[in-house]
Image (cartoon, helix red, strand yellow):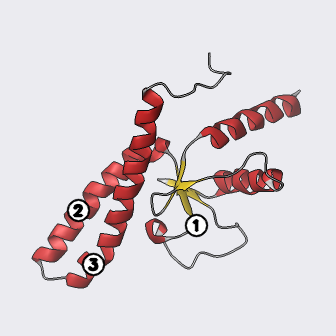
Amino acid sequence: MTAHYARITDQTVRRQWEKATKVNVQGERVVIDPDGPLAQAQWAKTRYGIATQTLPHGYCGLPVQQSCPHANACLTCPMFVTTAEFLPQHRTHRGQIIELITAAQARGQTRLAEMNQQVLGNLDRIIDTLDHDADDDADGGIEDSDAG
């Protein structure tokens, strides 16, 4: 019986993941074809990544067996993917980055300010894309037929 419910839960999670707007580090939508020839393999990789590599503001798309050369630099990593559920964290992080850049500029730490400008730009694009999608959904987007 447990296996039966686990399968239903996995199907529900997969449907929600496929339906969710996914955005990469540049704020570009990530499209994964749920009917493509590698759809099952992609879902298995994604499901495993979600379960084992959830970050405070998205998911790592890097295969688990590979090591990350970015060391906590997810917002500059091309493997980073996020969804609207992390908008509050992105907004908080954006505020922290602005404070850090402002303080670095005031102290004459040009390199620190420059390094964080890329993160700020990526956060701005991510937030803009996810906000735009949320606005579209609020304006009459298609609802899930399973919603109750």
Please tell me in which quadrant of the rendered image residue 62 appears. Answer: bottom right
Residue 72 shows in this picture = no
Q: Quadrant of the N terminus?
A: top right
Please state which of residues 16 and 141 is positioned toward the viewer in this rendering: 141
Position of residue 133 measured from the top left corner of the image (x, y, whole percent): 46, 40
At label 1, counting other C-alpha atoms closer than 10 Å, the crowd grade (few under 14, some 14-19, many 20 or more) is some
Please tell me in which quadrant of the rendered image residue 30 appears. Answer: bottom right
Residue 125 shows in this picture = yes
At label 3, counting other C-alpha atoms closer than 10 Å, the crowd grade (few under 14, some 14-19, many 20 or more) is some
Which residue occupies 64% across, 36% down?
16
User: Measured along the vertical axis of the image, is residue 82 above or below residue 99?
Assistant: above
Which residue carries the number 1 mark?
79
Which residue carries the number 2 mark?
98
Q: Secondary structure at mark 1?
A: loop
Q: CA distance from mark 2 to mark 1?
A: 24 Å
Disc number for residue 63: none
For this orientation, the residue located farthest to the top is 148
Q: Earlier in the sequence, mark 3 or mark 1?
A: 1
Please state which of residues 118 and 8 is positioned toward the viewer in this rendering: 118
Q: CA distance from mark 3 to mark 1?
A: 22 Å
Q: Secondary structure at mark 2?
A: helix
Q: Earlier in the sequence, mark 3 or mark 2?
A: 2
Q: Amino acid at mark 1?
A: Met
Q: Is residue 144 left or right of residue 3?
A: left
Q: Amino acid at mark 2?
A: Ile
Disc number for residue 114: 3
Position of residue 89 measured from the top left corner of the image (x, y, whole percent): 39, 49
Position of residue 76 measured from the top left corner of the image (x, y, whole percent): 45, 70
Q: Amino acid at mark 3?
A: Glu
Q: Quadrant of the C terminus?
A: top right
Q: Secondary structure at mark 3?
A: helix
